[in-house]
Amino acid sequence: MSGIILETRELTKSYPVGKGRSLSVLEDINIQVREGEFVSILGPSGAGKSTLLRLMVGLTTPSKGQVLYHGVPLPEANPKIAMVFQSFALFPWLSVVENVELGLKALGVPDDVAKAKAVAMLDLVGLDGFEEAYPRELSGGMRQRVGIARALVVEPEILFMDEPFSALDILTADNLRGELVDLWIQKKMPIKSILFVTHNIEEAVFLSDRAIIMGHNPGRIKADIPIELPHIRNKNARDFKFAVDRIFTILSKPAEEIPFLLEKGRYQFLPHTKVGAIAGLTELVHDHGGKVDISALASELSMEIDDIFPLIEASVFLDFGEIREGDYLLTERGKAFSEADTLKKEEIFRDAAVNNIQLIKQILQVLQSTSKHRMPEAFFTEILENHFTPDEAWNQLETAIDWGRYAEIFAYDYDAGELYLEKPE
Ligand code: ADP
């Protein structure tokens, strides 16, 4: 097919995690990047976004599937891709211009040509006059400009940007986003396409022509949607907010509601949230009449949508709330929970958790079926490690223990590292 620069076909990646087991990080990823497109890949952290970028540049090899560059599979193909990282990754002992020249010199470009190109590219990103400065003398925003100049100077066909603005303060990040769009729409950059990884929904809507939305455990594509708004986009415009809400809805839809994820043995990914925070959210929404616009709620709390995302996800799992077109609505159960006193809250939470949270249900069943009504935590992490990395397995168990203890579904013996039933029935 014409116009496709980069393509992945049924790309799958799993990592060995010891004891002969492997963890599936990405499954069946099919992406096409065409000439002239600015594509964002959006997803929660751990969804495999960085792994996907590494696979696409050939830094790591897939367990299954292929990456094709102009129809030629890696590793035969020689992709002209340059990368901008979150961490800037500049050499501190080299001046700004030397940092930018480096890639060209590595390609055998003569020194004077390399220097002229580097200076021109620094000019393009607004660093005229800073050529001889050292990275330590620059602000974060300026360092990232160097990062961008360094990527562009080698004239890649595609520019990969891996959360390039997430380490910057809000204002600087906003400025750089505006400038990036400007360079892109005015076709000032010597590139054909951009693949931009982010976990920030507004950023994706502000910048890109298309958003590929990923879910985690394992990383899969949940949706691939066009964003057809004219540039420069206004974050307060109705259409902008509508696009943000739509993506939020897709991101927050529990995996169970997406048919292709309904496979035997898949685990819910418990968001790492405390019960107190979930209770706080439901009470706040109750105060707003039981329904809030999620982006409005985020700005009211001075939080990013991504920060309240786990809270909302947890409350949806527990059947305290649901998401409809960018609004968060309390369910009857959520309403009762938000109105209840402490004791009653525990009771409602217990009922919600035992009925809706797979891991809690499973722990309870195991504890009920053993004669001592006790089980070492390792028993559960062992099972969880079939589905999560060892760290994530602990995080999942920790969240389940936190919720289970709050609702007195089971107790936890710190000294022994065991879960047990206080009042086995
Ligand atoms: P994201 O960029 O979306 O945050 P990553 O691609 O960094 O996600 O990671 C996705 C998952 O893969 C995570 O659970 C991470 O722990 C796991 N992972 C990444 N690299 C390795 C590796 N080399 N070995 C084992 N697991 C890994």
Image (cartoon, rainbow, N blue to C red):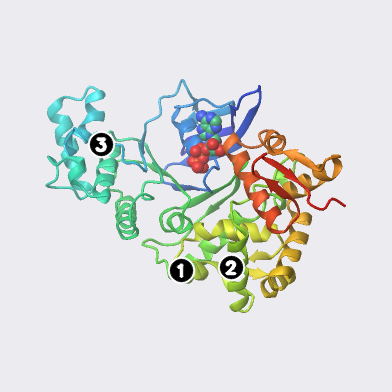
Expressed as whole percent of the image width and height from the top left, the position of residue 220 reads: 61, 42
| Disc 2: which residue | 280
Nearer to the camera, 197 or 336:
336
Asked whether disc 1 touches disc 2, contact meaning CB atoms under 8 Å apart, the reply is no
Asked whether disc 3 touches disc 1, contact meaning CB atoms under 8 Å apart, the reply is no
Q: Nearer the viewer, mark 2 or mark 3?
A: 2
Q: CA distance from mark 2 to mark 3?
A: 50 Å
Q: CA distance from mark 1 to mark 2?
A: 16 Å
Kindly identify the amino acid type of the residue bearing the numbered disc 3: Val
Number of residues whose C-alpha sits closer than 10 Å to that of mark 3, classed few (under 14), some (14–19) or many (20 or more): many
Residue drawn 61% across the image and 51% down it = 271
Residue drawn 86% across the image and 39% down it = 371
Which quarter of the figure has residue 318?
Answer: bottom right
Expressed as whole percent of the image width and height from the top left, the position of residue 218 reads: 62, 39
Q: Give the numbered dot on residue 307.
A: none
Expressed as whole percent of the image width and height from the top left, the position of residue 41 reads: 49, 46
Q: Earlier in the sequence, mark 3 or mark 1?
A: 3
Kindly identify the amino acid type of the residue bearing the numbered disc 2: Gly
Q: Give the numbered dot on residue 299.
A: 1
Please give left or right for residue 404 compared with residue 80 in the image. Answer: right
Expressed as whole percent of the image width and height from the top left, the position of residue 25 reads: 59, 35
Say what secondary structure mark 2 lies in.
Answer: helix
Task: Say whether mark 2 is within 8 Å of ligand 1.
Answer: no
Nearer to the camera, 157 or 280:
280
Nearer to the camera, 314 or 296:
314
Say what secondary structure mark 1 lies in.
Answer: helix
| Disc 3: which residue | 153
Nearer to the camera, 63 or 285:
285
